[in-house]
Image (cartoon, rainbow, N blue to C red):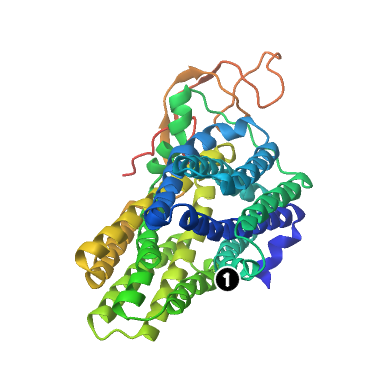
Amino acid sequence: MRLFTPLKNSVFRYLFFAQVISLLGTGLATVALALLVYEQFSASAGIILGGVLAIKMVAYLLTAPIAGAYANRLPRKAWLLSLNIIRAFLVLALPLVSELWQLVVLIFVLNVITAGYTPVYQALLPDVLENDELYTQGLSLSRLAMDVEALLSPVIAAALLLSMSYTWLFGLNALAFVMAAVFLLVIRIPSMKPSERTGGIWQQLTFGVRSYWSTPRLKAVLYANLAMSAAGAMIIVNTVIYVRANLLLPNEYVALLMAAAGAGSMLGAVVVPSILSVFSDRLVMLAGGAVSGLAMLLAGLIAEQSPAYLMLFPIWLLVGIGSAFVLIVSGRLVRDSCNKSDRNDYFAANFSLTHGMWLICYLLAGVLGSLLGLTMTFIVIGCIALVATGFSIIVWPKNAAAGLWHEHPEMNHQHPHVHDVHHQHEHQGWEGPEPHVHPHYHAQHTHKHRFVIDEHHVHWPRQS
């Protein structure tokens, strides 16, 4: 299959294997963590596990922008390798906890490290797979790996627990992180292009989020992620309640229905590269958001009538397909919306803000489900998803051009730079090889080119 073509690239192949082994180990540890919480804190296990999910999202929101701002000051290989080793030690410490505060601290720190790792990994892939088609296929493979892990990890964990204690699953996760570090050790990772940015700590920390929100197509990405997260959170939070309480079916029916969403996401990941060869990123992403919303409205309609379990499978499948459409296109649009030197910041902003959407939607799905009942909640969530998709359409018009006319004011400044369309000036001979730093002058001028927010373009230009 053409989908697996990126694996011919040795660097991507080892990065992909590192991702797969890390995901599998984390999946095993997720099962072990649930068992640990139940054994140590059985009286409030449900509340604690819900709190763990909230802690994860808060860690992502707080940490990813910091990692994006400063990760490029260290070699990417050393950064990724060392964070895997740190994660291995943290996971090994989990079975040793005896107090709730210890668990909370460990989970928070572990997810802080993950928030520092994942955006840098995501920003690395466009440098490894520079061809547009290969990069899309690489994104699809990564999505496929996540879905396969979600389906296989519980099954593998169940098989392992027949012959070992759940605490060994934490050890296997640590081993997985070490193996991922070994995969990273044997490859040559492309070096990061030096950043041209200047400014203090606050400007560095907020650059990614500010630039992301100032870019119309990325604002559309965020709204589409809200639509996808609303439907996804509804499934994750309320499938068990709907199947057990409304349909009065046993636990295995919950697992099968959840698997339908995973199968839909896998199917979406497989077909997206072919679809994107025919249709635009914008259309595919909007289709993903719309499908998510319409699936929720259809679920509400079915729940209103006499609900049939088998009728839910194609709806959950559609939600999975919609999520794959949105997530894979999101990666392409983030890549296309920034300079190479700023990719860490943009991918970190995307990681942080989209997980913020998940946090909001988890809370909405839980609260609305308990207050309004599941039938009305399906309808409300569907409306939220469709309205969010509508906002995506508005903020990213169909005729939006990549090349925009804009004006540069007269200015003197200095920052690391190479000589490109924005740097055409005389030198005295002492400045050294590019990129170099020296005071230089920009005359006032107006021109047109592919526009991204960076050191020289701090505001999106108004278009007449």
Q: Residue at x 70, y 40 (%)?
A: 77
User: Disc 1 marks which residue?
Assistant: 270
As drawn, 170 above or below 64: below
Which residue is drawn at the image coordinates 62% and 20% (left, top)? Answer: 437
Whether residue 84 is situated above or below residue 233 in the rendered picture: above
Q: In the rendered picture of this protein, how many numbered marks are placed on residues?
A: 1
Nearer the observer, 169 or 68: 169
Q: Quadrant of the C terminus?
A: top left
Q: Quadrant of residue 155?
A: bottom right
Please give the name of the residue rendered at 33% of the width and 86% of the height, measured from the top-left corner: 308
Tell which of 387 and 149 is nearer to you.
149
Q: Which residue is at a point 45% across and 72% down the rendered structure image? A: 258
Place of residue 40 in the rendered image (x, y in percent of width and height, measured from the top left) = 48, 52
* Secondary structure type for disc 1: helix
On the picture, is 96 further left or further right than 205? Answer: right
Q: Position of residue 226 (x, y in %)?
A: 36, 56
Q: Compared with residue 404, is residue 458 higher up or lower down, i.e. above or below?
A: above
Asked if residue 437 shows in the view, the reply is yes
Q: Is residue 254 above or below residue 372?
A: below
